[in-house]
Image (cartoon, rainbow, N blue to C red):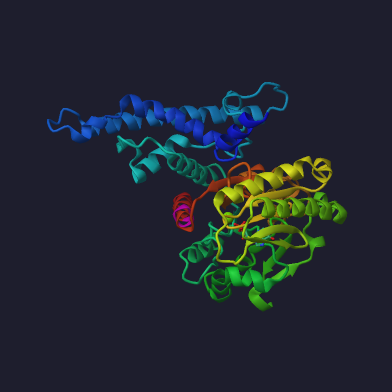
Amino acid sequence: MTTRYRVEYALKTHRRDQFIEWIKGLLAVPFVLYSQPHGAIDRQGTVNLSQTREEAHRRYSEILRDVEGMIDDHIAHQNDPENPFPSKLKLLVPSIGPFFTRLPLEAAFKYQDSKRYISSRRFVSPSFNDVRLILNSAQMMAVTTYGTLQLATFDGDVTLYEDGQSLEPTSPIVPRLIDLLRKNVKIGIVTAAGYTTADKYYARLHGLLDALASTTELNPSQKQSLIVMGGEANYLFEFSPSSPHLLAPVPREKWLTPEMAAWDDRDIAQVLDVAEAALRDCVRTLNLPAVLMRKDRAVGIVPNPPETRIPRESLEETVLVVQKTLELSAAGRARRVPFCAFNGGRDVFVDIGDKSWGVTVCQRWFGSSSEPSRGQGEGGAIKGQNTLHVGDQFLSAGANDFRARSVGTTAWIASPAETVDLLDELAELMEKRAS
Ligand code: IMP
Ligand code: MG
């Protein structure tokens, strides 16, 4: 449990996605066996490159079709509470979670191969990013083919705008979000950024909010289909053309789920106290150029002076220390209030609640009734299979979008530019279906 445990933890658990690594490993086999690296230097032309590419394409497709079948089997297990045995996929990838839709991986691979020329590569095997994008494409196909997308939720930093920046009027994301609203998809911006007042959110989102206020493309009900859920699951604002900063705060009693309403202020304070002490400890022991920031529903450390960069290793160490300290504390063990410790890229925050609650609130807000739901959509809330959360933080530890996976489908992007590509892919699929 000591050094080896810690080394393995550091190398594996929090820096890797086991499902993606597993698929990568499967694709590495045909890559090694059938790629023809000497083709690049073959002057006689004895290596037929198009044939090698076709062979690689066929074998990668077959593997992804097999994984697709395993996911179907996993879903069958998931839907059969009587079955005591784990699915084959669960045995092979123990960290695998629930699936809200099947995933057409073979078709998604073919699509990404046509864009990324994965099968044409002879020196670089199918990578983490290749697999991540194949999974995203499969999820886009699934939410538009097997059902109807009703709710799209978006993380803020890195997903809608660069880290620490804001959504400017010139951002290519703005017209794409308006287009989603025009297609009657509800939108929730589910960000960790926790502010109690509308002006702060307006500062981050003004490009979208101003466009929404002035557009003639949307009817009033479509305009009403945008909400902002801040601080993971702590502050709700709805779009309101007549309010200052175009956002109106919604009082908590109007949207808290019964579970959330039961979170006690004393427990919240206790979690934040433990987190604050652990953060202060890290600032001291790692000599971090940072100051502590305590809010009513969060505590974090931010760089000081603001333009300094805290080393990535120090940020990661801090998250893992705080996470462990909280888990082992009396407040953490009691599990009365959920919390989320994450590395924001430049800072570290511990928030009360997490994005699974934030997305759940959006599902209920836009659903037809206010009955409780956690991804299952009882009582008229939008279901997990009709929900898509787009974010950049999906590692299992020290990341905050990860939790949204328990209540809906997700797409893992790495930059705002990738969000643009994803939204284009989604729009094309939705239009194809509509016609
Ligand atoms: P997200 O990517 O939209 O979830 O935003 C995460 C970033 O919001 C963090 O990295 C912080 O820089 C910033 N932030 C501001 N206030 C808070 C807070 O109360 N909790 C967590 N993050 C915050
Ligand atoms: Mg983010």
The extreme left residue here reads: 44
Q: Nearer the viewer, residue 64 or 282?
A: 282
Say above or below: 54 vs 434: above
Say above or below: 148 vs 28: below
Is the magenta region chiefly helix, strand or loop?
helix
Side (left or right) of 119 relative to 262: left
Q: Nearer the viewer, residue 399 or 75?
A: 399
| Residue span colored magenta | 419-423
Q: Is residue 388 visible?
A: no
Tell me residue 235's x, y (percent).
Answer: 73, 62
Tell me residue 79's x, y (percent).
Answer: 67, 31
Q: Would you say residue 422 sits in the magenta stretch? A: yes
Q: Nearer the viewer, residue 5 or 235?
A: 5
Residue depicted at 59% across the width and 34% down the height:
7
> Which image quadrant for residue 15?
top right
Q: Nearer the viewer, residue 116 or 330?
A: 330
Tell me residue 51's x, y (percent).
Answer: 24, 30
Specify the quadrant that holds the N terminus.
top right
